[in-house]
Amino acid sequence: MLFPIVWFFALPPAQCQEEPFSSGGPAVTLGIEINLPSGGAWPVAAGADHAVLYIPAVGKGEMLGVIRVPEGRFAGVLVRPSMGENSVKIDVSALLKAPKKLSEVTCAEMQSWPSEAAGSYEGKKDESLLLSGLAQLGLPVFKVRVVGVRGPPPGGPKGGPGHPPYAGFRAFCDCSSTRDALNADMGVLAYPEAGKCAKIGECAQCCRILNP
């Protein structure tokens, strides 16, 4: 049985089901970077003013990120990027508070978690967007930038038990914060298995689903 793998390094309804082993990973060409300003529930390096959450745009929204934002009646913000022809569509929703903690939910529970829509956005590579619909719900407005896909970090895993199943696997999320030009990134990287959610340290969660 495969479990979510978390790697520490310097620096439409879908199905929550297991994915069969394959010789190649999902095609990924673009992703998004979400600016997380200091003062929130996420860690930021000393001397920095923000952290950056990266989520790849995989297919029709196979990867999604959940940011803990305990504000009023809300517990967090769900961000789900999906690929267009030459752009990324970003669906955003605010997750309502519930007896269970977000950090304890399964992939299936995340899909059915009560929420309110906070807008859909679309951008091409190098474009920046504001998730302005969050303001109407009394939540902080995050800035997002569409970026080219990231490769795995140097020395990253290349298959085997307890590792991502593909060499050069790019379906991962990470959260990092850079202090200054003289200091390396501090951050956390997570490879969630299909049908699973994985914590990216104390920054956010990343879930990987399979669209029907």
Image (spheres, helix red, strand yellow):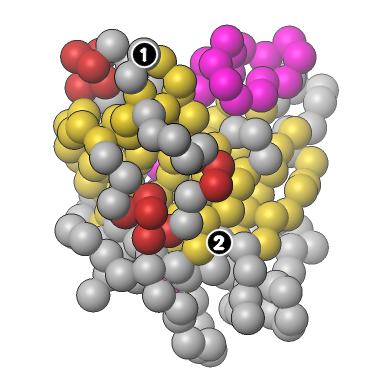
What amino acid type should be assigned to the residue bearing mark 2? Answer: Pro
Question: Residue 121 is drawn in which quadrant?
Answer: top left
User: Which sits in the foreground, 207 or 28?
Assistant: 207
Asked which secondary structure carries label 1, the reply is loop
Question: Residue 10, position in %: x, y?
Answer: 79, 41
Q: Can I make out residue 128 in this image?
A: no
Is residue 167 found inside the magenta-colored segment of the image?
A: no
The numbered dot on residue 72 is 1
**Quarter of the C terminus within the rendering:** bottom left
Residue 32 colored in magenta in the image:
yes
**Which region of the structure is painted magenta?**
26-50
Horizontally, residue 50 falls left or right of residue 188, namely: left
Q: Main secondary structure of the magenta part?
A: loop
| Mark 2 or mark 1, earlier in chain | 1
Return the residue at label 2.
192
Amino acid type, residue under disc 1 in the picture: Gly
Q: Residue 122: image x %, image y %?
A: 20, 40
| Quadrant placement of the N terminus | bottom right
